[in-house]
Image (cartoon, grey):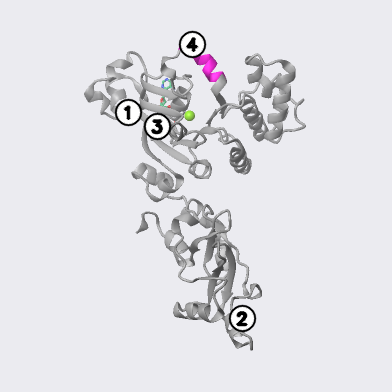
Amino acid sequence: MENTENKPQVIVKDVWKLYGKDAKKVFTKKLMQESKASIQKKTGCIVGMKNINLEIKKGEFYILMGLSGSGKSTLIRSLIRLVNTTKGNIIINDKDITKMTKEQLLQFRRDTFGMVFQHYGLLPHQTVLDNAAYGLKIRGIPKGERYAKAMQTLETVGLKGWEDYYPGSLSGGMQQRVGLARALANDPEILLMDEPFSGLDPLIRRQMQDELVELQEKLKKTIIFVTHDLHEALKLGDQIAILRDGEVVQVGTPENIVTNPADEYVQEFVQDASPARVLTASTIMEEPSILAYAWEGPKTVLTLIRSHKRRAAFIVNKSRELLGVVREKELVQLLEQENIPKTIPISSIKKVTSVTEDTLLEEMFPIISQNPWPVPVVDEKNKFKGIVTTDQIFESLSPLGGE
Ligand SMILES: Nc1ncnc2c1ncn2[C@@H]1O[C@H](COP(=O)(O)OP(=O)(O)O)[C@@H](O)[C@H]1O
Ligand SMILES: [Mg+2]
């Protein structure tokens, strides 16, 4: 069963889109190797997509990024055949959509997809509630049921209380929330978003991004999201595909893309991206040299600390849960007592701020500046995984490419 789980939900295979008359003339061995500009010059056909191959897994937040004209909209629209491809296959939930009849396609679109575009596409003479319920109406859902569902999704996107307003009286950000509510009302498996936040002011835009991240944690839908903004891509994406002139030039996690740009075009995109905003604790953490167990005596721990020329040690319990740090100072005090305790008393252990493996370096700056010891990394059960030192943080922030 696990195999089906891992199988991509969306497979784009050798897909081409050529705009223009008699596009098939491009499919000669020689022409197919040539650039978008050259194909256009020789045949008059505009390359929208050139031999695109992608796989998108269920539940993934998948970004399509590239400059204007790189083919992002052509690609995302082709997934529901708002654009008909010229060559290749697009397989979604095991069905080849390039082979569907019109009726099958309409049904499939309604059942599987939600769409949000830059221009909200709201009906101006219908209320927010009717706009949110629109997709359900098309599917023939009775009034009572569709209003109930639409109310629910309006609440999800933070628009409770706005049901009876008309779109024109709402701000851009709120209109886009209506668009999102409308897309979500169908409870689609796959959400397609083509530059949904591009028309919004920077502050509102950031807020919408934050909310979408939060929403996705609950919804866990497959989201395919187009943007030309690198920071948006890095913030939202699990995977990012970068397009240029209709071709995919790189696919990777935000971290891959920033630390290992495939070519100059990608390099250009990422040059002002800060690794602090993509690298996580797990990528740079290391084994702690000074880890002690709570049942060890003060003498053992003090010896350990001194042999490593440190001032403190991390203390864990039997299950390797992090208890805190014990400092040289406290250990010396314990050893000066008349009855030296056999184990380290809780009162000598100082609580520390820890981070989890997915914590961004950026979020760790305030922590490293507070304490003289490295930042401990724990899992969700507070089990000790490793440490991040100040040195490692600064090393990883040196210029991209590691020169
Ligand atoms: N309907 C169309 N007719 C002709 N060319 C088109 C059409 N739609 C898009 N294109 C061309 O296809 C290429 C990709 O466009 P598009 O997918 O809109 O890019 P993006 O969304 O990345 O800005 C561009 O060169 C564009 O001019
Ligand atoms: Mg576009």
Given residues 226 and 300, the one toward you in this image is 300
Q: Which residue is mark 1?
A: 36
- Residue denoted by label 2: 341
Report the disc number at residue 102: 4
Labelled disc at residue 54:
3
Q: Position of residue 326 (x, y in %)?
A: 58, 74
Q: Is residue 397 visible?
A: no
Ranked by sequence position, the earlier of labels 1 and 4 is 1
Q: Nearer the viewer, residue 187 or 1?
A: 1
Measured as percent of width and height from the top left, residue 361 is found at: 51, 57
Nearer the camera: disc 1 or disc 4: 4
Q: Is mark 3 within 8 Å of ligand 1?
A: no
Label drawn at residue 221? none
Is mark 1 in CB contact (under 8 Å) with mark 2?
no
Of the image marks 1 and 3, the number of the one nearer the N terminus: 1
Q: Is residue 267 above or below residue 109?
A: below
Q: Is residue 152 magenta?
A: no
Mark 1 vs mark 2: give the one in front: 2
